[in-house]
Amino acid sequence: MNIYRAIINKRKYKQIIKQPINESIVSLIENTLKLFPDTIDFSDGEPPPDNGFYSANLDHAWNKAEALNTTNDVNIDFMIWAIYGVLHQKCMELYSSKVFSLNLRELECKKIYNNYIKACIEADVSIN
């Protein structure tokens, strides 16, 4: 991506995330969350040397959500990715605090929404 497009994308992202989340996006988030388990146990987590985080259980939840998505709806694909991103970050934070499970109801809708918007803009996909 060239620098000009990156600047335009950043401006577009900032404009969109200031808007309230519409009902169709809330519905998309709720329906996509149903593809994930209610609770994820990431006690198998390993903080790799690059300050990241890896959990086979978390990856399994993501892969299962993708497998359960039987639609050809790109919005659901991007929402799965957005939810996984928020999950990954939250699990990494909790793991460092010695907490090893997460109920998906604890995820912030706004963070999921922001990740979704960012992913759609970067991929130049129209936003639902």
Image (cartoon, rainbow, N blue to C red):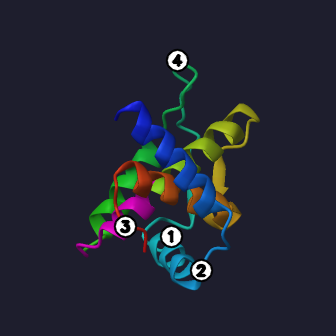
Residue visible at 68% across and 63% down?
Answer: 18
Residue visible at 45% across and 39% down?
Answer: 6
Vertical relation: 128 (above or below) 103: below
The residue that label 3 is drawn on is 126
Q: CA distance from mark 2 to mark 3?
A: 15 Å
Q: Is residue 11 visible?
A: yes
| Residue 77 among those drawn in magenta | yes
The residue that label 2 is drawn on is 22
Q: CA distance from mark 4 to mark 2?
A: 37 Å
Give the magenta part as a residue range.
Answer: 71-81
The answer to whether marks 1 and 4 mark residues whose Cβ atoms lie closer than 8 Å is no
Q: CA distance from mark 3 to mark 4?
A: 34 Å
Tell me the quadrant of the picture where the N terminus can be found. top left
Q: CA distance from mark 1 to mark 4?
A: 29 Å
Vertical relation: 37 (above or below) 94: below
Q: Secondary structure at mark 3?
A: loop
Report the mark closest to the observer, 4 or 2: 2
Give x and y (percent) for residue 77: 34, 63
The residue that label 1 is drawn on is 33
Q: Mark 4 Cα within 10 Å, few/some/many (few <14, many 20+)? A: few
* Nearer-N-terminus badge (1/2): 2
The answer to whether marks 2 and 3 mark residues whose Cβ atoms lie closer than 8 Å is no
Disc 2 residue type (three-letter): Asn
Disc 3 residue type (three-letter): Ser
Q: Secondary structure at mark 4?
A: loop
* Nearer-N-terminus badge (3/4): 4
Q: Mark 3 Cα within 10 Å, few/some/many (few <14, many 20+)? A: few
